């Protein structure tokens, strides 16, 4: 390049810089920056060329495709670890999902063999959208129970109560035991034959009972509830979380049920109930060997039992009654205000999750409970439970009795009163809950409207009709049998009697008329 050309280039560059608002210093900085970038790129290229293939990829070391014709599955060693074990990586392009797992071996041939097996199994799952991770029955149960535990609530129908949660645990133990019996404890749930569920209900029915052995077999309704709980677990977790497909869902069969809907709880007859309550009052609470505390406990239990028979409340509802829940009824006449009381069952204490009021003539019983508490020096507040634990260690803690304690007392009462000849069980199993069925039966016999009974008991009209239909039929026996049987005979007799009386009346009239005519003739002859 000639000096003239150099000057021309310099002048042109100077004009360009001047036009862009730059000077010679700016130009030098730009040149230096470009030089630094080119130098770093050259150094990076040199380093890459010096690296071996294993060093270039720190993760996928010794990468090798399992099936040469496919690139969606390969084995490799993880360059970040020192174990040297092989891993497998499977990719599904349609679902954009990746599955990676350690094969647990450093042997290449074994790794390829294991990867081929996993590829066949896993690729099918990926294509179906099923979860890659497989779980056993035990793991399924634990996942489901953890889910349900998060829903535990004191308010019925607002989740699951702790009592229902405990019952659920017991129900699912049957399925776990059944799977163990079938030798599938370690089998993944997708590999358990679906038809295995067909005989689950029958298997439960044949198992010996550990509790409530008064009857040889479990009720069919209870067994079907266990099956339903197991089926819901599979639907809520196994199916919805895609651990299995619908084709792998177990096939369950329920036991056939008797269509008879009448209640199966044994109950006392009215005269038996009255006799037992009299025995509690006059004998059980007056035994010479008991101290004052035990005497008060028995008095309060007797009143508890009497109240449940008057209220028809469920066991949990009875034990959850607080003093603030009991009140007089303002719309009653002064006479009934002295007798009746209204008991409020709040939402959290109701099985249905709906609050209600129960009305009954229990004012005197409530006052007697208060009298016995006063005898022990116990004071109560509106928020306190009515049936508190009277043990000295529990006083002042507002701790209500639990159902087992009440059932234990009931057993003492029934056993003692039967031994005293007050009543005969005759094979009946009277429980605390029998009071509710007694209440329903007694109210229907007294002619209480089914709708009002359903409201008071916190249940449906349909339930009352189906469960106590035999009582409603007996209650209306005269109306139902009108014109039939003995009523028809009575009607015929009444009709015949009226006809006979009419005939006698006519005959007497004729006799009287004839006698009058005869007297008239005789008098005329005189």
Image (cartoon, rainbow, N blue to C red):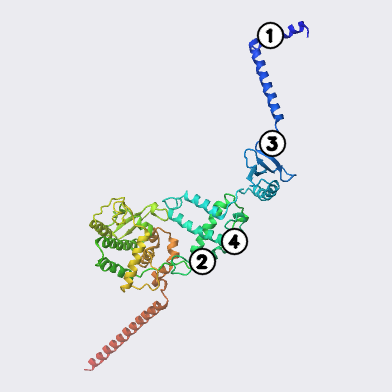
Q: Residue furthest bottom?
A: 525
Q: Where is residue 519 shown, x and y percent of the image?
A: 24, 90
Q: Secondary structure at mark 3?
A: helix
Residue in view at x 45 percent, y 61 percent: 462
Q: Which residue is mark 2?
A: 207
Quadrant holding the C terminus: bottom left
Q: Which residue is mark 1?
A: 14
| Dot 4 or dot 1, earlier in sequence | 1
Callout 3: 10 Å neighbours few (<14), some, many (20+)? few
Q: CA distance from mark 2 to mark 4?
A: 17 Å
Q: CA distance from mark 2 to mark 3?
A: 62 Å
Q: Secondary structure at mark 2?
A: loop
Residue in view at x 36 percent, y 69 percent: 268
| Dot 1 or dot 2, earlier in sequence | 1
**Residue 336 visible at all:** no
Residue 14, quarter of picture: top right
């Amino acid at each position: 390049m000639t000096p003239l050309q150099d000057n021309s280039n310099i002048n042109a560059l100077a004009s360009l810089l001047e036009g862009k608002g730059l000077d010679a210093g700016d130009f030098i900085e730009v040149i230096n920056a470009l030089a630094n970038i080119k130098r770093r790129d050259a150094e990076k290229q040199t380093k890459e060329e010096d690296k071996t293939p294993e060093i270039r990829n720190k993760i996928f070391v010794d990468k090798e495709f399992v099936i040469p014709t496919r690139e969606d599955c390969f084995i490799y060693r993880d360059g970040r670890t020192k174990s040297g074990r092989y891993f497998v990586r499977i990719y599904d392009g349609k679902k954009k999902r990746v599955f990676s797992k350690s094969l647990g071996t450093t042997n290449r041939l074994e790794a390829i063999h294991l990867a081929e097996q996993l590829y066949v199994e896993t690729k099918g799952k990926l294509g179906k959208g099923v979860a890659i991770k497989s779980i056993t029955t035990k793991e399924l149960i634990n996942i489901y129970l953890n889910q349900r535990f998060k829903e535990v609530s004191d308010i019925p129908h607002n989740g699951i109560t702790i009592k229902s949660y405990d019952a659920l645990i017991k129900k699912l133990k049957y399925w776990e035991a059944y799977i163990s019996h079938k030798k599938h404890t370690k089998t993944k749930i997708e590999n358990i034959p679906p038809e295995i569920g067909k005989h689950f209900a029958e298997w439960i029915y044949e198992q010996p009972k550990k509790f409530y052995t008064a009857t040889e077999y479990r009720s069919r309704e209870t067994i079907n509830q266990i099956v339903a709980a197991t089926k819901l677990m599979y639907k809520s977790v196994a199916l919805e979380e895609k651990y299995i497909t619908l084709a792998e869902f177990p096939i369950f069969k329920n036991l056939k049920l008797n269509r008879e809907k009448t209640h199966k709880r044994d109950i006392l007859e009215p005269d038996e109930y009255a006799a037992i309550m009299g025995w509690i009052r006059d004998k059980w609470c007056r035994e010479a060997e008991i101290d004052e505390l035990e005497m008060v406990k028995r008095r309060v239990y007797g009143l508890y039992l009497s109240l449940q028979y008057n209220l028809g409340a469920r066991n949990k509802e009875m034990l959850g009654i607080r003093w603030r829940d009991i009140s007089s009824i303002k719309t009653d006449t002064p006479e009934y205000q002295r007798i009746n009381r209204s008991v409020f069952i709040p939402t959290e204490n109701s099985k249905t999750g709906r609050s209600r009021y129960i009305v009954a003539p229990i004012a005197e019983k409530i006052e007697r409970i208060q009298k016995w508490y006063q005898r022990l020096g116990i004071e109560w507040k509106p928020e306190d439970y009515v049936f508190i634990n009277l043990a000295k260690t529990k006083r002042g803690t507002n701790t209500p009795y639990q159902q087992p304690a009440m059932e234990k007392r009931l057993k003492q009462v029934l056993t003692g009163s039967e031994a005293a000849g007050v009543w005969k069980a005759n094979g009946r199993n009277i429980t605390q809950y029998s009071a509710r069925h007694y209440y329903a039966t007694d109210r229907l016999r007294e002619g209480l409207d089914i709708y009002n009974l359903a409201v008071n008991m916190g249940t449906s009209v349909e339930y009352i009709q189906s469960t106590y239909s035999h009582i409603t039929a007996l209650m209306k026996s005269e109306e139902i049998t009108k014109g039939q049987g003995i009523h028809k005979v009575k009607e015929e007799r009444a009709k015949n009697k009226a006809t006979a009386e009419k005939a006698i009346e006519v005959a007497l009239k004729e006799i009287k008329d004839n006698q009058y005519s005869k007297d008239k003739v005789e008098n005329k002859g005189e």
